[in-house]
Image (cartoon, grey):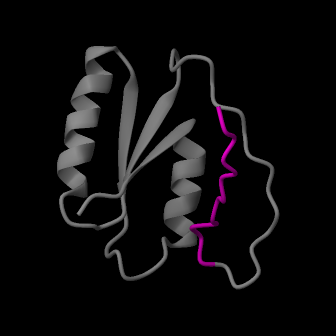
Amino acid sequence: MTHVPVMLHDPTHEAAPATRARLAAPATLDDKTVALFDIGKSRAGEFLDYLERALHDQDVRTRRFAKPTNAKPATPAILGDIAEHADVVVEGLAD
């Protein structure tokens, strides 16, 4: 199997992004809250609705967050709210 390097990009739109170590994914979603983050792209809500139903079927807590438009970066207030109220984030990137 060939190892293909993966390039991760900082979605925060910072002019000089801070270097951050990637957090390890939790082993399970037990006792975790999953943030479902709609960035305002077309049909992202449909994807997140489907995912939310699937997570609820597995007794996983979810909380919805949204940017007002996909044309601008998320505000510090939205990002802070997500950081305060969720353990894991799924970002809805559908078109």
Q: Is residue 86 visible?
A: no
Q: Is residue 42 left or right of residue 1?
A: left
Q: Quadrant of the C terminus?
A: bottom left
Identify the residue at image location x=49%, y=63%.
78
In magenta stretch: residue 31: no
Identify the residue at image location x=20%, y=36%.
50
Where's residue 65, x and y in %?
Answer: 37, 53
Where's residue 44, x and y in %?
Answer: 25, 56
Where's residue 62, x and y in %?
Answer: 37, 33
In magenta stretch: residue 10: yes
Q: Is residue 71 left or right of residue 51?
A: right
Q: Is residue 20 left or right of residue 68?
A: right
Residue 23, quarter of picture? top right
Pick the residue in front: 74 or 14.
Answer: 14
Identify the residue at image location x=82%, y=63%.
19
Q: Is residue 29 visible?
A: yes
Q: Is residue 39 left or right of residue 32?
A: left
Pick the residue in front: 69 or 27.
Answer: 27
Residue 15 higher or lower than 82, as above or below: below
Chief secondary structure of the magenta span? loop
Q: Quadrant of the N terminus?
A: top right
Span of residues in magenta: 1-13
Where's residue 15, x and y in %?
Answer: 70, 85
Residue 63 higher or lower than 70, as above or below: above
Q: Give the number of marks.
A: 0
Pick the residue in front: 31 or 54.
Answer: 54
